[in-house]
Image (spheres, coloured by chain):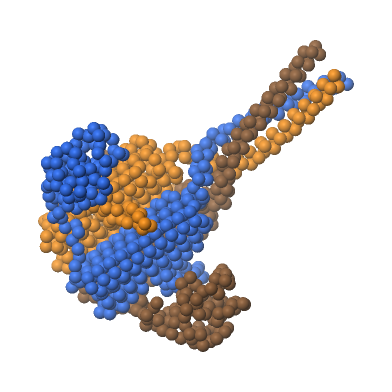
Chain colours: A blue, B orange, C brown
C-alpha cells in the first residue's frame, strides 16, 4: 500500500522504542496501522477495549501493547507508553516520505510588501502575500496561498497553512497554528438600520491571539468594534468555529467544531464547548464551564457548571427533563385516566350522597 | 438579459429533444428559465405542482411539460423526461457562453515540485501548487489556487475547485469532485492535557477518499491519528461539513450542510444525515440510517432506523414527544385542576364520613 | 502598545469631533480603546451600562460620553453621538497606520483572461484570477487570492476579500462586499439515485446577488438548478452561512452565522435569522419574520411572526413549553402523588360503601 515504507523486525522496533518482545523478534514488519486498517506485515496498536477475537482475526503480523496480552497468538511488543511508541514507530517506518517536507526560505513568487519586516528563519511559500507594515517573527512558516494583510504582527514559530487569511492589524502570539481557510479579522456582523437600510457599524478593532493557540480550518474570528477580539493563551479552536466581534475568549479553552459565539461574549479559563454549541451575545461563561453539544447558552454560567440543552440549563436538570420528556405520551395518558377515575369517584360519591339524603329524608 | 443566448423556435427545440408540440411550433424562444424567473421569449418548465393561474400569468412564451396540460393557452412542448429535456435546451440556448471553459495544460504560473508525477491530460491552473512526492492521475483539473501538499495521491478524472487544500498524504480515488475551500487532512482536534496545558496528540494518519465522492465548499475532513479517516465510495458531502479524525464514513452516504461528526465515528452504507445534525464521538450508524435535521446522535443507531431530536431518538417517538410537548401548558393546567377536584372530593368524603360518624354516635 | 499612534490633547479631540470637555482639556491622549482594554493615555467610551466603580478603576486617562457623568473624577468628552465620535477619534489617532492601504491597479501577477472586461478604477491584486468572459465594473477591489471564474458579472464598487471564489456565471450587484473564503455558485446538493448510485442533478443555474449585500467569511451560496439562487438587495449574511440551491432570499434580511437554509426556500423582506438556525427545504418565511437561534423551521411562517425551537413554533408558545418543561420532573411526581391520593380516596369510599351496605343489611 505504501511504496515509501521500509522494512524491519519486531526486535529492532523493540530496541528502537525501548520495549520488550513476546514471541519471535524476527517477525518482519513494514508498516504500523490501526487495527481496522492493519494488513499482513503490519504492527498494530491494541488495548483492552478490543476483543481478543478481533485481534486474532486481524491480518496484522504483530501487536503493540501496554501490558502483555495473555492468550494472544501474535508476537507482541510491550512498551510502557504504547501510544508514544506507536507514533515513533510510524514515523520511523515512513522514513523516506516527504510529508514533513518543510517550506524553506522566502519564495520569489511570494508577494511581500517592501515595508514588511520578516524575522530570520521564516519561510514564505509561493503565492502567499504579506501586506504593508507587517511584522513577522522568527522561524514562522507561511504555506502557499496565505494572505497576511497590512499591519499584521505575528510572533515566533507560528505556522499558517494554505489559504489562511489575516485581515489588517491581526496580531498573533508565539507558536500559533492556523489551519487552512481560517479567516481572522473580517468585519463583525453589526449593523445600524436607518431608513430601512442596514449600515455596517464601526469595524475599527482587530483580532488578538495569544501564545500556543491553534485555530481550525475555516474558522472565522471577527475583529472587534473599537478594540480587540481576543483568544487567550493556550486555547484551541476546532474547524468551522465562529467567534463574533468583541469576544474575549479565556486561556486554555477547548472549542469544538461548529461552535458559534455571538458578539461581546467572554469565557473564563479551561472552558470546554462541545460541537455545534452556541452562545447568545453578551454572555459570560465562568472558569471550567462545560457546554454540551448543540447547547444554546442564553444566560451567564457560573464557574464549574456543566450546561446542556437549548436553551441551556444545568446538565443534570436537563437530563432529568429529557428522561421525563420520554414519558410524556404516557403521562398524558395517565392524566386522562386520572380524569376518568376522578369522574368515576365523583359519581360514586354523588350516589352515596344521594342515598344518604334519601335515608335522611326516610329517617325524617 | 443574457447577451450570449441564441434564438430558435419551439418546433426546433421539439426536434432537438425528441418531443411533441401542442400549439404553434413557430413560437420564438431565446432562453429557458424556471417559472419564477421566466420572461417573454422564455421556455419554462412546469408540472402539476404549479397552479394553472400562475402558469397563465407568467410572461413565458411556452411551457415544457411531461404530460399535456389541458386548458393551458401557452404553446407546449411535451417530453418524456422534461427535466432532462430542459437541461439539454438550457445548454443548447447558451451556445456561445464560456461557463464551461476548461482549464487546459499546466500553467507556467503553477508551482509544482519537481518530484511530483502528473498524469496525461491533467490541467493545473496558475497559482496552484503541488508538493513533493505527489502523484496525480489522468485528466484531472486543478483550478486556480488549489494547494496539494506533499505526498498526496489523486486518482483519475478528479476536479478540485479554486481554493481546495489537501494536507500532506491525502489520497483521493477516481472521479472525486472537491469544491472550493474544502480542507482535507488538517490535524484532528485531539489534545492531552498535562500541567494545565493542552498538547496536540499524534497526527500521523491521513485522509482517504473513495471513488465518485463529492465534497462541498468549506467542508473539513481531519486526518486520522495513526491511520486513515475514510470517506466511502459514492458518498456525497455538502458544504460546511465537519468530519473529525478517524471517522469511517461508509459508501453512498448523503451528508448535508453543517453536519458535524465527532472523532472515531463510523457509518454504514446509504446513510442520510440532514442539515446541522451532529454525532458525538465513537458512535456507529447502521446501514440506511436517516438522521433528521439538527438531530444530536449520542448512541449507536441500528440499521434502517430514522432518528430525530437532540438527544436523537427514534423519530416516531420523538414526534409523539413533540406533539405532547405542545400540550404541556394545558397538561399543567389539567394537573392543577385535578388537584383541586381531588381536594374537593376529599372534603366531600370527609363531610360524609363525619355525618356518618355522627349518625353512628347518634345511633349508638 | 501601538507604535504608529500619535498623541494629542482632550481639548483638541473635542474640537475635532465638535464635543465639550468636562475637566482638563490639556489631558494627553494617544489611543482610544474600549474600557476593558484601556491603558494610561487612553480615551475610552463609556455609557450607563458600565458601573461607576469600573470606570474609576480603569487606567484610562479620559472618558467619552453621550451625557455628562456626575461624580466621575476622570476628564470627560461629551459628544452628541459618542459612537460616531469614538470611531472618528480612533481613526484620527491611528493617523500613520496602513490598515486601510488600498490595493491599486491591476497586478502583473494577477491572471486575467484576455476576454475579460475590467472597469476603470478596479484594482486586482497579485495571485487573483479572472476567467473568460467576465465583466467587472468600476472601482472594485479584488484582494489577493480571489478567483472569479468564467462569465461572472460584477457591478461597481464591490470589494472581494482574499480567497473569495465566484464559480462561473455568478452575478454581483453594486457595492457588494464578499469576505474571505466565501464560495458563490458551487454545485447544489441535489442527486438522483439510480441503481444504488447518487448522480448529481442538473447544475445549470447561477447565483445572483443584489446591491449593497454583504457576505461573510466562508459562507457558501450554491447555484440554482436551472435559474438563479438570489440574495435580495441590502441583505447581510454573516460567516459560515449555507444557502442551498434555488433559494430566493428577500431584501434587507439579516442572516447570522452558521444559519443553514435548505434548497428552494424563500424569504420576504427584513427577515432576521439568528445564529445556527436552520430551514428545511421549500419553506417560505414572510416579511419581518424573526427566527430564533438554533431554531429549526419546518413549515411556512407568516409575516411578522417570531419562531423558536426545533421544530420551530411561535416563540411565545415555545417559551411556555420551555418553562413548563422545567417543571416536568415535578409534574411527574405530582402525577404519582395524585394517583396515590386517588387510590386513597377510592379505598375510603369503598370503606364507606361497605359500612353503608352493612348498615342497609343491618337495617333490613
Residue pictured at 18% horizontal, 73% vertical: A108
- For residue C333, what is the image quadrant? top right
Q: How many marks?
A: 0
Which quadrant does the C terminus of chain C fall into? Answer: top right
Residue pictured at 63% horizontal, 38% vertical: B335
Asked if residue C67 shows in the view, the reply is yes
Q: Position of residue B195 (x, y in %)?
A: 36, 57
Which quadrant does the N terminus of chain C fall into? Answer: bottom left
Q: List the single residue furthest toward the right.
A: A364
- For residue A354, what is the image quadrant? top right
Give the side of residue A177 with respect to residue C322, left or right.
left
Asked if residue B269 shows in the view, the reply is no
Residue pictured at 27% horizontal, 53% vertical: B202
Vertical arrangement, residue A332 with respect to residue B128, above or below: above
Q: Position of residue B183 (x, y in %)?
A: 28, 57
Give the side of residue A90 with respect to residue C300, left or right.
left
Residue pictured at 50% horizontal, 60% vertical: A283
> Camera-side residue: C59 or A360?
C59
Vertical arrangement, residue A331 with respect to residue C299, above or below: above
> Camera-side residue: B308 or B157?
B308
Q: Position of residue C16 (x, y in %)?
A: 49, 85
Give the side of residue C43 with respect to residue B242, left or right.
right
Q: Position of residue C286 (x, y in %)?
A: 49, 56
Amino acid at each position: 500500500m505504501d511504496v515509501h515504507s521500509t522494512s524491519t523486525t519486531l526486535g529492532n522496533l523493540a530496541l528502537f522504542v525501548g520495549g520488550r518482545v513476546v514471541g519471535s523478534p524476527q517477525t518482519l514488519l513494514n508498516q504500523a496501522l490501526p487495527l481496522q486498517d492493519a494488513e499482513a506485515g503490519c504492527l498494530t496498536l491494541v488495548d483492552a477495549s478490543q476483543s481478543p477475537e478481533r485481534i486474532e482475526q486481524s491480518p496484522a503480523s504483530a501487536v503493540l501493547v501496554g501490558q502483555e496480552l495473555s492468550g494472544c497468538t501474535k508476537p507482541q511488543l510491550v512498551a510502557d507508553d504504547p501510544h508514544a511508541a506507536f507514533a515513533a514507530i510510524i514515523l520511523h517506518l515512513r522514513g523516506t516520505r516527504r510529508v514533513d517536507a518543510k517550506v524553506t526560505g522566502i519564495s520569489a513568487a511570494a508577494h511581500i510588501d517592501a515595508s514588511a519586516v520578516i524575522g530570520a528563519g521564516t519561510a514564505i511559500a509561493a503565492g502567499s502575500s504579506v501586506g504593508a507594515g507587517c511584522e513577522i517573527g522568527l522561524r514562522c512558516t507561511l504555506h502557499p496561498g496565505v494572505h497576511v494583510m497590512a499591519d499584521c504582527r505575528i510572533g515566533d514559530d507560528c505556522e499558517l497553512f494554505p489559504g489562511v487569511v489575516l485581515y489588517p492589524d491581526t496580531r498573533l502570539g508565539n507558536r500559533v497554528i492556523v489551519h487552512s481557510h481560517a479567516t481572522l479579522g473580517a468585519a463583525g456582523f453589526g449593523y445600524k438600520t436607518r431608513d430601512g437600510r442596514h449600515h455596517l457599524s464601526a469595524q475599527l478593532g482587530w483580532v488578538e491571539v495569544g501564545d500556543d493557540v491553534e485555530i481550525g480550518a475555516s474558522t472565522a474570528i471577527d475583529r472587534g468594534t473599537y478594540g480587540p477580539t481576543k483568544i487567550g493563551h493556550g486555547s484551541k479552536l476546532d474547524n468551522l468555529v465562529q467567534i463574533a466581534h468583541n469576544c474575549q475568549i479565556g486561556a486554555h479553552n477547548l472549542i469544538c467544531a461548529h461552535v458559534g459565539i455571538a458578539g461581546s461574549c467572554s469565557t473564563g479559563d479551561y472552558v470546554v464547548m462541545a460541537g455545534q454549541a452556541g452562545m447568545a451575545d453578551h454572555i459570560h461563561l465562568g472558569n471550567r464551564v462545560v457546554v454540551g453539544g448543540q447547547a444554546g447558552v442564553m444566560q451567564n454560567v457560573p464557574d464549574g457548571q456543566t450546561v446542556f440543552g437549548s436553551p441551556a440549563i444545568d446538565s443534570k436538570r436537563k437530563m432529568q427533563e429529557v428522561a421525563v420528556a420520554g414519558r410524556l405520551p404516557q403521562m398524558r395518558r395517565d392524566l386522562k385516566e386520572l380524569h376518568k377515575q376522578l369522574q368515576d369517584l365523583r359519581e360514586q360519591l354523588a350516589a352515596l350522597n344521594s342515598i344518604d339524603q334519601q335515608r335522611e329524608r326516610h329517617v325524617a
